[in-house]
Amino acid sequence: MYSRPVLFDQSPTLAENFSLLQGRTKIAVLFDETGREQAEGILETANTIPAESLLVSEDTPDQKVSEFVASQKMGTQLCIVAQWDTAYRLFSLTVEEGASEEEIQTFIIGQKKRFVYCMKCFSTNEIAGEASAVQCQCSAHLEVGPFFSKVRKGYIGYPFIPVEQRQTVGS
Amino acid sequence: MFTQKLDFKTTDLTTFPFPFTSGNYRYSNDLKKLQNINCVEITPEYELQIKAKRRLLDEQPEVRFQSFPHTHEMQWEVLEMLVDMAVSRYPQHFEVEKDGKNWTFKNNILAEEESFVFGDSTTLKLEPFDYIGRHFHNDFVLMVQRDDNYYLEVGQVSYAALFSAHWNKGMSFNEIHAPVPFVSRKGDQMAERIRQFLHSIEAGEPWTRINWNLMANRWDVNYETMDVWEPERSLITAENAGELVRLRVEEQKFYRMPRSNAILFVLNTQFLPMEDLKLRQEWFDLTYSVLQDIPEPMAEYKGIAPYLPQTVEYLRREDEKIKASKESEA
Ligand code: HEM
Ligand SMILES: [Zn+2]
């Protein structure tokens, strides 16, 4: 599809604690090594319903993940437990297989990442921590706006010229 | 590089879609049934506007035109509608020969002729929507209905008031309008109600509304050039506002496309400098009244807050002059 959901820091799928989502009768857990402990916890909590899991590393081919997701039946809740970059990749592969946000719970190990989309050069840049402004690789200064684009995969970056760099015009 | 200097304004005032009907303005669901359903309109500024539009599209293709690859069939439907409208309203300016799928479209104003196979995008140098859009001074946006919402899947935007085809690509009606401080007179949230209203638009019965803004010595303002126009706004003074500040009006039209079920959003953008408002006393009075009463969030959102006071001061001085000359006549 043309504008599938993407994982971002305000994704409705992000969760702290596992809970069985409405109408789900089975769970499938995708996790990386850092998420092993939490994944095992989830599987334990949900031990009354059928469950499956897949450990994913950087070397795991996309196709293996896609096949795992595709083989899940209707009514399965998909849990992703991993560091940001891996979670991002797993999330994208999962929605590509047709899963909707209502079927996914995402647990991030460590820091979430945020990206800003430069309206000057149309590239994405990672935002350091809580920063409200970022300098793009193209040298434009960007104010991080509150609006997110799934197609551009980042928050809008409004270009501005820092006051000290402005040429004084008139008085 | 494209200069934003505006070298035209509306000269035939009968074609200017003046936006105000009362002395104060608030957001509302102000859609009305469109009377003349043909959106093709040739004004005295046609050639100037087309020239500027095409220059922008050529210089900033990424900013000004965006589409998804799956939209070609829908694009051809739009092309067909616009060609038919142009030929039926202005047979002296536009002609089409249709020999089965082999079409030849002629624009006599620009002395241009193009032959293509209808439905086969490889027979055109541009995408069908981009090609046909360049024959009319309007902006065109195709909002495709999926489930309960509308998504921007094709857009050709050369007269932006914070409208970026690039940024808004793929967004839903609600996502697009998220920045608008949509509070009506009654104080309720309007975006949902308007989206529901769009569902009721039927093929062959388009709707219309007028949106307005002010422009400080520019053709358009978009997010891509914010670093340029934001600081420039402080150059407006009560002395130069008459010439440099323009009332920028968008006549918006909404068409349900019968085959794709998408909504085609057509914008006719026209400009009138503040000093020309005096040509119609009623327009001058209404604009002066409305601009004195803009709620702060609306002024901030529209990007006019830094030069609104200077503009109102210009109008106040003119108003005094008009009143004084009336008194001396009496
Ligand atoms: C369905 C097609 C439509 C599209 C593609 C569209 C697009 C837009 C865009 C891009 C903006 C600027 C948003 C920004 O600041 O980033 C905007 C603003 C706005 N839209 Fe729409 N719109 C549509 C329909 C409507 C309708 C039907 C209404 C009302 C009945 C409406 C009312 C408004 C208003 C009031 C604003 C704020 C404008 C201002 O104060 O200058 N829109 N729209
Ligand atoms: Zn950049």
Image (spheres, rainbow, N blue to C red):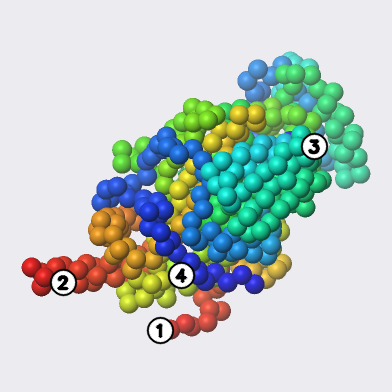
Residue drawn 40% across the image and 54% down it? B16
Task: Give the residue pinned by disc 4.
Answer: B217
Q: Which mark is residue A93?
A: 3
Residue A92 at least partly seen: no
Residue mark closest to the camera, 3 vs 1: 1
Asked which quadrant contains residue A36, the reply is: top right
Are the numbered discs 3 and 4 placed on the same chain, yes or no?
Answer: no
Chain name for mark 4: B
Mark 4 burial class by Cα count in 10 Å: few <14, some 14-19, many 20+? many
Are the numbered discs 4 and 1 placed on the same chain, yes or no?
Answer: no
Residue drawn 49% across the image and 31% down it? B205
- Give amino acid for label 1: Ser
Residue mark closest to the camera, 3 vs 4: 4
Residue mark closest to the camera, 3 vs 2: 2
Answer yes or no: disc 4 within 8 Å of ligand 1: no
Mark 1 burial class by Cα count in 10 Å: few <14, some 14-19, many 20+? few
